[in-house]
Image (spheres, rainbow, N blue to C red):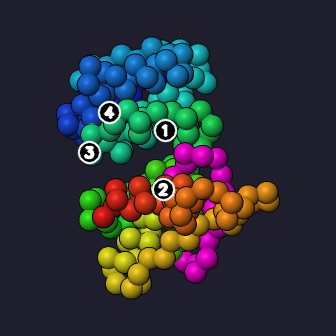
Amino acid sequence: MILRHSFTPADNARLAHLCGSLDEHLRAIETAFAVRIGRRAETVRVDGPKDNAEAAMALLQHLYQRARKPLDAQAVQLAIVEATRGALAETVTDSGAPHLQTRRADLAARTPNQARYLEQIVSHDLTIGIGPAGTGKTFLAVACAVDALLRSQVQRIVLTRPAVEAGERLGFLPGDLTQKVDPYLRPLYDALYDLL
């Protein structure tokens, strides 16, 4: 099936951001959806199986809306994953989740679950987040703490180490207290150094 779409109003900067350097974003979408994408001016042509072509075209339209600023490969890959899961409609928009102010940059959620996590942190005194490693739980929690500190909502940030699991006894580990606790707090320190 061949689908055609013209992006209007034509915005060359947005189209350049959408396609990426040497059309790398288009190639990533082609690979993910097993389609062929052709582009001429503001018209994009997607050729492939019906469901794949429709999903790829929906993703292109979604990314075009977000392409006011350059899109990095990681953001495009994340959008591809969301689209293949059928959660593209839920993808975070610029106005959805709270934006966090830090000294280095403003941060915002990149996925719907991160947006929900940020909303819970902002609206509740205690928030417990569980999930797979590498999904941004610790970094977002520290970013919220730094944001609250910079906005003078809190006076200090208190870091505590996690509860000791069964069988672990810190008293019998070699080294002083700092050497015993530091491995638990290293991700928190790293996030703080990144944000301050």
Q: Residues within 10 Å of mark 1 (few under 14, many from 20)?
A: some
User: Residue at coordinates 43% horizontally, 60% vertically from top-left?
Assistant: 189
Is disc 3 placed on a helix, strand or loop? Answer: loop
What separation in Å lies between label 4 and label 3 (alpha carbons)? 9 Å
The reply to whether the C-beta atoms of the residues labelled 4 and 3 are less than 8 Å apart is no
Does residue 43 appear in this view? no
Q: Amino acid at mark 4?
A: Leu
Where disc 4 sits, the SS reads helix
| Disc 4 and disc 1 in contact, CB within 8 angstroms | no
Could you tell me how far apart the alpha carbons at marks 3 and 1 are, in whole angstroms? 16 Å
**As drawn, is 160 to the left or to the right of 9?**
right
Q: Residues within 10 Å of mark 3 (few under 14, many from 20)?
A: few
Q: Are marks 2 and 3 in contact (CB under 8 Å)?
A: no
What amino acid type is highlighted by mark number 3? Lys
Which stretch did the figure color magenta? 123-136
Residue behind mark 2: 186
Q: Residues within 10 Å of mark 2 (few under 14, many from 20)?
A: few
Q: CA distance from mark 1 to mark 2?
A: 27 Å
- For marks 3 and 1, give the one nearer the viewer: 1
In the image, 38 versus 192, the foreground residue is 192
Please give the name of the residue rendered at 32% of the width and 38% of the height, measured from the top-left corner: 71
Which residue is identified by label 4?
18
The label nearer to you, 2 versus 3, is 2
In the picture as drawn, the residue positioned furthest to the right comes out as: 166
Residue bearing mark 3: 69
Q: Quadrant of residue 60?
A: top left
Q: Are marks 2 and 4 in contact (CB under 8 Å)?
A: no
Q: Find disc 1 in the rendering and name its residue.
A: 78
Q: Is residue 69 visible?
A: yes
Q: In the rendered structure, which disc, 2 or 3, sits on the residue that comes first in sequence? A: 3
